[in-house]
Amino acid sequence: MSATAELVPMGTITAQLGQRIEVGDGPKGTRLLVDVTSVEVESDRLRASLAATDAADWLTVGSDGTVGCVDVRLTLKTDDGAYIYVEYGGRADMANGLIVTAPTFQTGDERYAWLNKIQAVGAGSLGEDGVLTYSLYEVVLSRN
């Protein structure tokens, strides 16, 4: 028996990117550290913003410069006071500013415990102003 996946819209994430530090070429490619200075999450089940100033993308760009490997970690605070840790990896089309990610969530707050159980997918676009906007989806599995 196989499984299928449905993408159910969750909302939007808007992030402002800040300072970019180039660490240099390493065995996996060029490592960049990109600060995330603000985050806003808007959905019908959750409203949140960046809780701390330690959010960043530890991006690695392949040797030909066309593909970036996203590695983001951040903490959100909901509008009703819950903290949610978010981490995601993914791939970035460096030429077109398009990004696909696979966020997971961790929280101890019972109101948002449902986040601990889901896999999300983000479809993102980076603007020239350093604003990254994701459409966020929950992956819902079912058996055929």
Image (cartoon, rainbow, N blue to C red):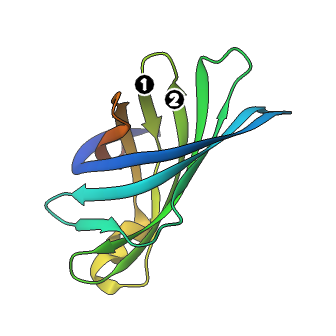
Q: Position of residue 132 (x, y in %)?
A: 35, 39
> In the rendered view of the protein, which quadrant contains the C terminus?
top left
Identify the residue position indicated by label 1 in the image: 97
Q: Nearer the viewer, mark 1 or mark 2?
A: 1
Residue pointed to by mark 2: 92
Q: Position of residue 50 (x, y in %)?
A: 37, 66
The residue that appears at 86% across and 33% down in the rendered structure is 27
Q: Earlier in the sequence, mark 1 or mark 2?
A: 2
Question: Measuring 34% from the left and 74% from the top, which residue is drawn there?
Answer: 77
Q: x%, y% of residue 100?
A: 44, 34
Are dots 1 and 2 in contact, CB under 8 Å?
yes
Quadrant in the picture for residue 59: top right
Where residue 20 appears, x then y in whole percent? 57, 42
Who is closer to the viewer here, 2 or 38? 38
Tell me which amino acid carries mark 2.
Answer: Ala
Image position of 45 with respect to 138: above or below:
below
The answer to whether any part of residue 144 appears in the image is no
Closest to the observer, 84 or 144? 84
User: Could you say whether the residue bearing mark 1 is in a helix, strand or loop?
Assistant: loop
